[in-house]
Amino acid sequence: MTQSVTTDSIQQAASDWFARLQGDAGLEDWTAFQAWLEADPAHAAAYDEVEALWIEMEDLPAGEIPAAVAPEVVAGNVLPFTPRPKPPARRWVWAGLATAAAAAAAVVLAVLPQLSRSTFTDYATQRGETREVALADGTRLTLGGATTLRVRLTHAERDVTLVDGEASFDVAHLENRPFVVAVAGREIRVLGTEFNILSHDNRLAVTVRRGLVSVSGGQQGAVRLAKGQQLVQSPGQATSLIRTTDPNAAFAWKSGKLVYRDASLAEVVADLNRYVATPIRVDPNAASVKVSGVLLVDEEAAMIRRLELFAPIVSQRSGGEIVLKAKATRR
């Protein structure tokens, strides 16, 4: 009985997918369909049956149903049959395919060539906004404030471009299908791991919380990072620094905290400018100020007040911006 129920649910899902893909299916639909096909060989077999049934019915004169096809089968597949002119392009695509997995790839190439070959799906956040994204392969992304990234999933590889901002990656492990992030002229390649990337204002930081990542493209060549390691490249530096760190500090922004240990004021301000509406600028007389502490991501004025407690600075509003200046020393 259990097997019968399972079979019926798979056939229903196959019918639903077939009906869904006859409309204006987008890249996310095709990606999800591909994942469903690959999840179980029974999915591909069920889809083949639904597709074959539809093609057979399309070849019949109006109103006729093949004798070999019982009415309950048609009803079970939930495919209302209304004969229509045959779509030659689609029939050509489907007719020459040996398996449903191959069908998915071929249809993407034939019906949506611009999507399968070069189009990425873009994700972006505004200042102060965070966003979670679940990809079809099981990978989970979290975007920090003022972040833009692009994603493309293919059979051979999973490609992401971090254009600007900060994002964390919890990558689903898929053998022979690497996950590759292009960022700031570098390439980060993994199979399954959890890591964080900050790329903003000519500053790059890659922090690993689980697994291994390979970072290539720098003057040092390919660098492997393990759990608790961080690659940092600051503005004006020709080479990267590899150091041991608490990875949870790099991920703290996801829970509304920005953690600093002896960081330059300019570095802190670059982060804050992705979370506040009013631009913040560091006055030259405060360029050497260092900051240590945990800033809560909160209302703009409150964040500035906390920063003034951590560092010997004062804030002034001037011409639509906030200027941070070093406190005058007492004599």
Image: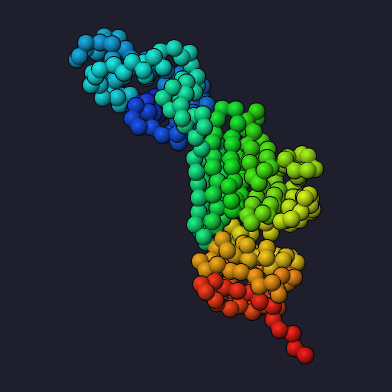
Residue 106, image x, y percentages: 47, 21
For residue 6, side relative to residue 173 (left or right): left
Q: Residue at x 69, y 52 (%)?
A: 205
Residue 201 seen in render: yes
- Answer left or right for 292 relative to 322: right
- Residue under the point 61% across and 69% down: 281
Res 263 → quadrant: bottom right
Q: Is residue 130 above or below residue 78?
A: below
Q: Position of residue 55 (x, y in %)?
A: 33, 15
Which of the pair 94/325 is nearer the observer? 325
Q: Residue furthest bottom?
A: 331
Query: In what quadrant of the picture does the C terminus appear?
Result: bottom right
Question: Is 302 rendered above or below residue 116?
Answer: below
User: Exactly how many numbered labels are in the figure?
Assistant: 0
Q: Residue at x 44, y 22 (%)?
A: 110
Residue 289, picture quadrant: bottom right
Residue 2 visible (yes or no): no
Residue 251 image position (x, y, % from top left): 64, 56
In this view, the residue in front, 46 or 138, is 138
Name the residue rendered at 62%, 30% in the picture: 177
Please identify the residue farthest to the left as the structure is shown. 63
- In the displayed structure image, the side of residue 313 where residue 245 appears, left or right: right
Residue 17 located left or right of residue 217: left
